Amino acid sequence: MPLEYVVETMRPLPVHPLAGAPAFVAGVSMIRGQGVPVVNLALLLGGQADPPTRFVVVRAADRSVALAVDAVIGVAELPAEALAVVPPLLAKAAGDTVTGLGALDSQLLFVLQTACIVPDDVFLAAPPAGAEK
């Protein structure tokens, strides 16, 4: 994802389940005094959910989302020719979340659209800032 959307990385915090949330939403975590939805990135992309070792907090429009990931490998600058639009055959499966595909050192890359990761109803169900669980 573009680095401009990354707020911070951190060790995972406690996650409180959120009834009715999609399977890829692990729940809500209190991060810097705000209830922030936690998305298991592996589940979002169709993989297997392992316990996360890091949270990557990103801006999603005017909100924040914590991506639960197994590792943060690094930051890389990608040339424009390394990225391509999602092919039509995959576009329906990717929805609005994956906006591009690419490769770096023969590794497949997904470009995420952070504003579309969490449905609005999940944000509305998250506890307001300062709420304690």
Image (cartoon, rainbow, N blue to C red):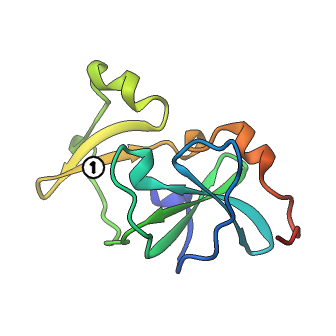
Image quadrant in which you'd find residue 71: bottom left
Q: Position of residue 50 (x, y in %)?
A: 38, 65
19 left or right, relative to 133: left
Residue under the point 73% across and 49% down:
62
Image quadrant in which you'd find residue 77: bottom left
65 left or right, relative to 97: right
Query: Does any portion of residue 119 appear in the rendered image?
Result: yes
Residue under the point 83% across and 58% down:
127
Q: Position of residue 18 (x, y in %)?
A: 70, 53
- The residue where tag 1 is placed is 109
**Dot 1 surroundings within 10 Å: few (below 14), some, or many (20 or more)?**
some
Q: Quadrant of the C terminus?
A: bottom right
Which one is nearer the viewer's eye here, 27 or 81? 27
Amino acid type, callout 1: Leu
Q: Is 84 located above or below residue 79 in the figure?
A: above
Hey, which residue is sitting farthest left in the picture? 106
Which one is nearer the viewer's eye here, 21 or 3? 21
Residue under the point 27% across and 19% down:
89
Number of disc labels: 1
Q: Helix or strand or loop: what does disc 1 sit on?
A: strand
Hey, which residue is sitting farthest top in the picture? 88
Q: Position of residue 10 (x, y in %)?
A: 54, 78
Q: Is 20 located above or below residue 8 in the figure?
A: above
Query: Does any portion of residue 1 appear in the rendered image?
Result: no
Image quadrant in which you'd find residue 29: bottom right
Residue under the point 52% across and 70% down:
55
Q: Position of residue 21 (x, y in %)?
A: 65, 44
